[in-house]
Amino acid sequence: MKKYIKNTCKALVLPLLSLAVLSCENNDVEDVYIDSNQPTLTVTSSTGSFSFNDVESDQEIVLTATLDKPTNKQVRIYVFQESGTADGNDISLPATGYINIPAYQTTASATITINRDFIIEDTENAVINIGDSRTTAAFYQPFQMNITIQNYTNQDATMLLEWDDDNLDDHLCDMDFDVYLDTFEAYAFTGDCPESLYEPSNPNNLWTGELSNGVHNIMVDLWDTNGFDPAQEIPVPLRLTFGKVGTFEAYLDLNGLYTSASEDSNNGSGGVMMVGYVEVTDGSYSVYDRNNQLVAQESN
């Protein structure tokens, strides 16, 4: 009698366990219908175009990849530059290098940014591949995006105060230098390293525009050394680029004007120096160094 009861229980328990397992497996996929055939993939642009001519300002293009039905495989569309003179400073591609549609999903997006180009250079171009033979989990025809980038220009004054030595001490960036015109028509008081001014961003600390006619003295201020005090005094290798966005540049060599032992303005009064000046005539620049020597002159 005991043996009969034991066998009966065993026969009842096994079907119940099988039912529980099957129920769990069905819940995992009950909302997704998977067709055994591969899906078809399409890629669209937020601008409605894949050809961009004479771009000179910041522009974002959102690429959206869409499957016509879900699949149990991830689908990747690789985005990379095939050719052209533009580089990473001109165009920002997706950081991962691809658009990824996860398994069981049907869409994903990524962004390509055409960056505003402040450097004086010729028109550049780029051919961007949107997909290649590595996309195998969907039916897809790769294609190319063509971009032409014009040199960006305007009449605003620009200033870039930077290190002029690739072998400098990393801690020199602890020293906070500012640069400005004594007319305050252009100034950069951000504490950045390097200190750069290309566009008016904030009237409190970063501002520029078209300069009025006359003389504007170019001032550099060692605002704060922030405790940088090496055992041996070292010269600060500085260079200042002054000009206009995309059209004119003059270079002022400031090596030797400051050292690691120089007094700063925040803790004293000796941080400011006049390093040159710009003479503006009918909007054109003539840039002179601190010794009144002409460095560069803008042609009309």
Image (tube, grey):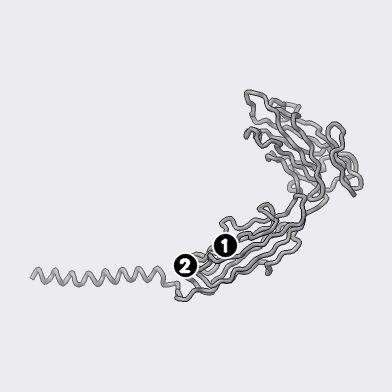
Label disc, if present, on residue 202 of the rendered structure: none
Asked whether, in this view, residue 159 is left or right of residue 166, the answer is right
Identify residue type, mark 2.
Answer: Lys
Residue picked out by circle 2: 73
Which of these two is toward me, 202 or 95?
95
Q: Give me the C-alpha separation between circle 2 and circle 1.
A: 16 Å
Residue picked out by circle 1: 78
Residue shown at the point (55%, 68%) measured from the top left: 107
Residue shown at the point (87%, 34%) measured from the top left: 293
Which of these two is toward me, 254 or 211?
254
Q: Is residue 56 visible?
A: no
Q: What element does badge 1 sit on?
A: strand
Identify residue type, mark 1.
Answer: Tyr
**Image location of residue 115, percent across then percent down:** 70, 55
Question: Is 91 situated above or below 162?
Answer: below
Asked whether, in this view, residue 135 is left or right of residue 49, the answer is left
Query: Extreme left residue here?
Result: 1
Tell how many labels.
Answer: 2
Q: What element does badge 2 sit on?
A: loop
Query: Extreme top residue here?
Result: 231
